[in-house]
Amino acid sequence: MDFGSTRNRLNRADVDDQLSKPIGRRIIIGIVALGCAGIVFGESVQRVVGRAITKINPSGSGIASLFPGANTFRIYTVTGSLPSESTKAYTLKVGGLVNRPTTYSYNDLLAMPSVRLDKDFQCVTGWRVPNVHWQGVLLSHILDLSQVQPSAKAVLFKSFDGVYTESLTLDQAKRSDVIVAYEMLGDRPISSEHGGPVRLYVAPMYGYKSCKWLSEIEISDQVVPGYWENLGYDVNAWIGRSNGRSDAPVDGA
């Protein structure tokens, strides 16, 4: 859910609207300072920023999307608050057009064959985090375990924030660089600020395709546009050569 758009960037009016919410000016200034410091001092500062955002704005105003985070990641959330779930309570439901609908625990995912990817994270607004370490389970492996039915054409992803969704075609979902991730940034469990304990990582596409706080995978007979596609974003979000990448299919399928 790290997102952005060349067509939908935050402008001054958006910022003014956020600052008009009932949040104290000193608190806003302090969080901005902490957010900027997060780039330099790392994830411990980012966690403070995330918790402060949630504490002062539990109902969600979108204010979190204004601030940078650790390792040059930005903290983004469409609800304005940062959802959190423990690894003990976490579950991932897989259903839809499958012969074996299943609900996996966090430990179930850890027990599956793991893969490591060292790849960039690219936001459509232009910022990039190079050579991020990701570890998790191939999405294709989970689909194989579920025994996808012949009529299936696409995969829908849902977040436990209760709002965010994303989708891929079945062919895209089976790529070797699409994983259900539980570690990032150097063998560390994924924090709630980064979409943990489990999130999707779609290496060849812009960040908004990598659904944070992943809670459900649903196999369907057609692509269902996700949260940002319904607001005008591209359904096929290949990064492409304009960003120094060449891993998208030539036909853009």
Image (cartoon, grey):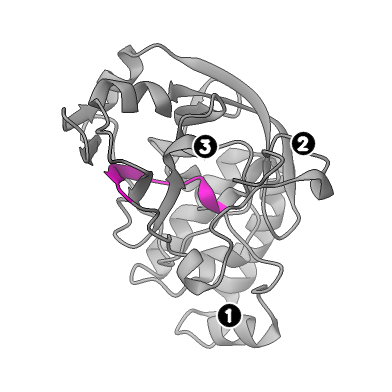
Residue located 29% across and 59% down the image:
162
> What residue would you read off at disc 2?
246
Residue located 64% across and 56% down the image:
34
Counting residues from the N terminus, which is met first, the one under dot 2 or under dot 3? 3
Q: Is residue 180 above or below residue 165?
A: above
Secondary structure of the residue carrying numbered label 3: strand
Indicate whether residue 209 is drawn in magenta: yes
Residues shaded magenta: 208-221
Numbered mark located on residue 201 in the image? 3
Residue located 54% across and 81% down the image:
18
Secondary structure of the residue carrying numbered label 2: loop
Residue 119: x percent and y percent? 67, 29
Real-space Cα distance between discs 3 and 1? 36 Å
Q: Quadrant of the C terminus?
A: top right
Instruction: Name the kind of residue labelled 1 in the image.
Output: Arg
Counting residues from the N terminus, which is met first, the one under dot 2 or under dot 1? 1
